[in-house]
């Protein structure tokens, strides 16, 4: 039985058979070599006559080692986007024109109203992620009730 991982790198891990179970083992030194990123996996069994049966498939995320990675940024994509939008809004607070032209070149800026809508979207996404990470789920202040 073999575990096949495909994503930023191709990784194959062979299983060891102990009685009725199979187990996949990799040392910390081996997994430290894995490129971080999103992988799709497939567990396949091969018979003696080379027939291949796919047992199960799925998807996983190999996170970067924050101790080993230089310049590690643990923020989610939504947190990074929210920070970028906030930086643009902060710089735009002192600029009153939405577009300007110099010679034959024009620059159009995203309207502040559009940036505010985008900011609201990412702020809500970050709040949901924080609630989920804290184990609070998606219910917010609503208390689900069932009548019987």
Image (spheres, rainbow, N blue to C red):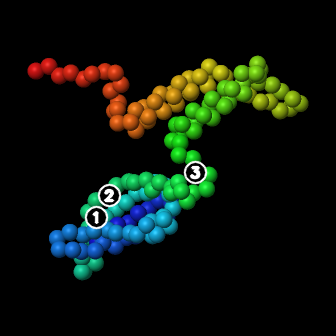
Quadrant where the C terminus is found in the figure: top left
Q: Position of residue 32 (x, y in %)?
A: 48, 65
- Please give left or right for residue 4 compared with residue 124 in the image: left
Residue drawn at (89%, 30%) of the image: 103
Q: Position of residue 86 (x, y in %)?
A: 63, 29
Which residue matches tag 2?
57
Residue drawn at (53%, 42%) of the image: 75
Q: Can you tell which mark lies on residue 72?
A: 3
Q: Is residue 119 visible?
A: yes
* Contact flag, marks 3 and 2 (Cβ < 8 Å): no
Q: CA distance from mark 3 to mark 2?
A: 30 Å
Q: Helix, strand or loop at disc 2? A: strand
Nearer the observer: mark 3 or 1; the answer is: 3
Residue closest to the far left: 148
Q: Helix, strand or loop at disc 3? A: loop
User: How packed is label 3: few (under 14 Cα within 10 Å), some, or many (20 or more)?
Assistant: few
* Contact flag, marks 2 and 1 (Cβ < 8 Å): yes
Residue drawn at (47%, 54%) of the image: 63
């Amino acid at each position: 039985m073999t575990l096949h991982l495909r994503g930023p790198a191709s990784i194959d891990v062979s299983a060891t058979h102990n009685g009725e179970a199979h187990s996949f083992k990799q040392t910390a030194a081996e997994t430290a070599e894995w490129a971080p990123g999103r992988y799709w996996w497939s567990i396949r069994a091969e018979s003696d006559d080379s027939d291949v049966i796919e047992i199960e498939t799925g998807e996983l995320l190999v996170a970067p080692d924050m101790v080993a990675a230089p310049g590690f940024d643990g923020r989610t994509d939504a947190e990074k986007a929210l920070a970028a939008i906030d930086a643009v809004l902060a710089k735009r607070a002192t600029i009153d024109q939405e577009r300007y032209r110099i010679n034959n070149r024009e620059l159009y800026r995203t309207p502040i109203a559009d940036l505010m809508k985008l900011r609201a979207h990412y702020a809500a996404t970050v709040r949901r992620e924080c609630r989920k990470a804290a184990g609070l789920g998606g219910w917010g202040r609503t208390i689900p009730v069932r009548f019987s």
